[in-house]
Image (cartoon, coloured by chain):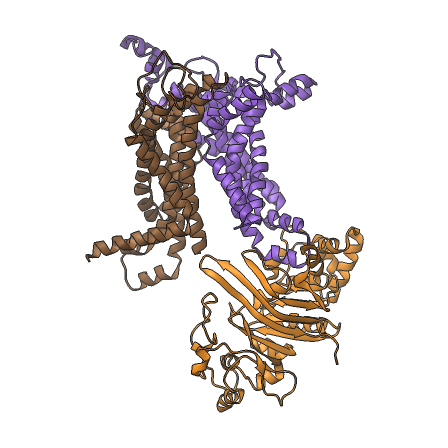
Chain colours: A orange, B purple, C brown
Amino acid sequence: MSETKLLDVRGVVANYDSPRGVVKAVNAVSFSADRKEMVGIVGESGCGKSATIRALLGLIRPPGKVVEGEVLLDGQDLLKMTKKEIRQVRGDKIGFVAQNPFAALNPIYKIHKQFHNVIRAHEGRSSSRSTRKRAVDMLTAVGIPGPERILDGYAHELSGGMAQRVVIALALILDPELIVADEPTTALDVTIQRQILDLLRRKTVDEGRSLLLVTHDLGVVAQYCDRVVVMYAGKVVETGLVSEVFARPAHPYTLGLLQSVPRRGLKVRTLGGRVPSLIDYPPGCAFADRCVFAIDRCREDIPELRPAFPSGRGVREVRCHVNEQEVFADAAVDR
Amino acid sequence: MGLMRLIGKRLLLIPISLFILVSLSFLLLELMPGNPAITIAGDFASDAEIEKIEESLGLNDPLGARYLSYLGSVVRGDLGRSFFSDQPVLGELRERLPATMELVFLSLIVAAIVGLFLGVLGAYYRGRKVDKATRGTVTLFQSIPDFLMALLLIFFLFYLWSVAPAPVGRLGFSGVSVEPITGFLLVDTLVAGDLNAFVLAGQHLLLPVLALGIVYAAYFGKTARSTMATALDSTQVEFARACGLSEWKVVYYAFLQARTPILTYGAILFGALIGGAAIIETIFSWPGAGSWALTAILSLDIPVIQGFILAAGFVTITVFLLLDVLILLLDPRVRL
Amino acid sequence: MSDLGKRTLEILKRFLSVLRSQPAIGVGLTVVLAMLLAGFFLPLPYSPTRPDPLNVLQPPSSLHWFGTDSDGFDVFSRTIAAAARDLPLALIGTFLSALVGVPLGLLASTKGPWSERIMRGLDVFQSFPLVILAIAIVTLMGNRLENVVIAILIVNVPRFMRLVRSEALSLRESRFIEAARAVGATPIRVMRKHMFPNVVGVALAQTSIAAAQAIGIIAALSFLGVGVSPPNPSWGLMIQTGVRSITTGDWWVVVFPGLAVLIAVAAFNLVADGLQMRQENER
């Protein structure tokens, strides 16, 4: 069982310099993802989930900077790579699916030209005919009818669902091992959302890839992901199997998130307060001010990630001073 | 086809725009104080002399009659004669407008190349040392009045280093003459197969083109920096990068987004420079439309002023029409 | 402390914090102030208006720091003295433009077909080249100094109007203006209390851009002999004197007044850049 994980993120720290001070957008984030596994990264907007995936793709641009940590893909540290090496990894080993397909696709180039450019960037000279053939195959594989016609058209002629399929096809054209999807369905109709997520799940599980799904939609995580990473204020506050975390949340923030989703038979509770500023990081737990369980220690002493519910399935970790049984007991009261 | 219909519609609009322009310029010049008859006759002329000149210029006719007769002759292609030189305005325009257009066109190319280089570099390295350096350069270029730049270039390139010829006209005192076909000397000399004259024309263009080009590069630089900075921050550029495209390609993707506002800015500058090059033309004794209009304004030579406004308006409208067509051809999204 | 005193202190504090975050603004303002003070108070070695025909085209020396021109004027004395003419003219023209343009722009931001039509008309006006327009105005209105200020005013008011209007239009869509209107604030109050403070930033930046342009326009006009009366010193006029000399290598007649224009324009551009950067950072 000592086989290495496909992706292992260890203690990544990314800062942004702003006129008002240093923003700690990603604060010692660690998690991992295995083949045939979908990992959901959830949290409110501004919690650092987007910055985290950009850090591992090497897409953090000045004034931002990754200052610490390791991102191991197949045992290779992406953060130690030169600009040229990481560029070769992007697209080739990691495919990226953007949030809004119309914003992501090039509006001036025909779809074929965009496939052509991606293939050429990694494989050098390739004939237009060969890139076309591969693009047709890939478009068919992501369920696009009449791929020939699509290739000669432009992005704006597509429907939202079709455009997102094209984006996925572009992300998969070089057969990457890891797919990173940043809120891939938020810009789409609800009916289309399912199809896109089903497609992503198929491409991940059936073809032995690994997928990171960044979302704020807990329903999506519950339905599609195997494991979940909950982030708050730039830090991971809880990780574990989706089935475990949703059944027995160990962190008060996770509990709050779950309670704020309307579900049959449960009272909806909203999370009061706001995410703290990432510049003046509080001396203790960043969630303490919004937390109903907070004790004095929470405001003085930053909690570390520790194992939770040791008797459950899979590895559970939580970043909280409060005993997880207490949190779970409160969750049970609502039922 | 959508493109043809748009061009047709815009071509129809040209005479209407020109009519409004002619009427407005006629009225404005009428309303302004100052009597051209006095300017022509000089300060010491007697009332009778002034009266006589006013009579000969038709200044005593009622406003409406003069407006109609002016409109009538414009339609017939007669823009009147200069109060001073007595030359037909249209004939002078035909000679002088191409000289200005050649200067402006080449200057804008230089300005675009220098400005885009500075602007794209600044946007790419936003907030870092390179950005500060390019912004400083742009601010410096912007702060130099064009005539000062011209004089400094004359001092260094003509007087000190003798790289450029003396600042006198399009061909200097060489005695070389070129049969005007397009009016663009660089083109006409090549058509005539006169390589010697081509080089000569190029040498004389060097200094004024550099002076205008460097000063106006600042405007391109500013526009390019802000539009490229936005484009480089866009999802499209991030996605291109996430697909592993090279940085050159990524910057090119951003440029595809940013080019429309930059082109538009170029068109605006083109229109502005037809008159705005006037001082440079004066310094280099360039026989262009700008210096011609400048002299006309200073001496209240109304037919010339009106002829210039009409010509500048016509060129500006045409350039904007070409711009719209170009944008349409470049962007698949706007095709109807 | 009185209410007024408190507000002054508040404004002063904000000003200082702006200077701290954007030092370029402070540098630019200091340079302009220094030039103004020098122009008005610096004792001059020679008369700026009386030439010395025995000393023409002297290169810079310990006697004539910036040399003399072809008429025998001392270039140093004239360069400094011109600051007391050219800078105040530019500043007065610009401030008057802001004073007229900003309220007009706010008024033009009210919805309706007329404000749209007026702006279209101004667009036509703005497509004329700046310098040509200014020359035409001064020539047609009479070749006098005051008319230069009027030319600057006519050139700049439409710019202020357009800028403030577009800023105000986007503000009108924002929530807090909606909220102010919902609680029954009168249109004038909305404009004065809610919109004006929010357009001050862009208006200030535009003021320094306009001041930089105004110096350029004044230099161009006096270069062409419009709006100035020799032998009164003006930078553009001095550069014009030097045109004849520069082709024979006597560079100092052009270079020193030229540098003065350059420094003054660059100073205002620095202030404008600083103000714009501040706005960019605040968003």
- Is residue A5 depicted above or below A117 in this figure? below
Q: Report the residue that reaches farthest toward the front.
A: C62
In the shown orientation, is residue B289 left or right of residue A92? left
Residue at image position (62%, 79%) is: A223
Quarter of the image with the N terminus of chain B is: top right
Which residue is farthest left?
Answer: C2
Q: Is residue B116 or residue C177 the one in the foreground?
A: B116
- Residue A297 position, x and y percent, is 45, 81
Residue B175: quarter of image: top right
Residue B236 picture quarter: bottom right
Q: Nearer the viewer, residue C227 or A144?
A: C227
Judge from the rendering whether residue C142 lies leftward or rightward of residue B87; answer left or right. Answer: left
Q: x, y percentage for residue A156?
A: 62, 56
**Residue B2 percent across, percent down from the top left:** 60, 45
**Residue pictured at 49% horizontal, 24% vertical:** B151
Q: Nearer the viewer, residue C86 or C96?
A: C86
B154 versus B325 height, above or below: above
In this picture, residue C222 sits left or right of residue A31? left
Residue closer to the observer: A304 or C235 = A304
**Residue A32 seen in render:** yes
Q: Is residue B143 above or below residue A242?
A: above
Q: Residue at x 63, y 62 (%)?
A: A159
Question: How many numbered discs?
Answer: 0
**Residue C234 seen in this snapshot:** no
Q: Position of residue C263 (x, y in %)?
A: 42, 34
User: Horizontal placement of B74 versus A194: left or right?
Assistant: left
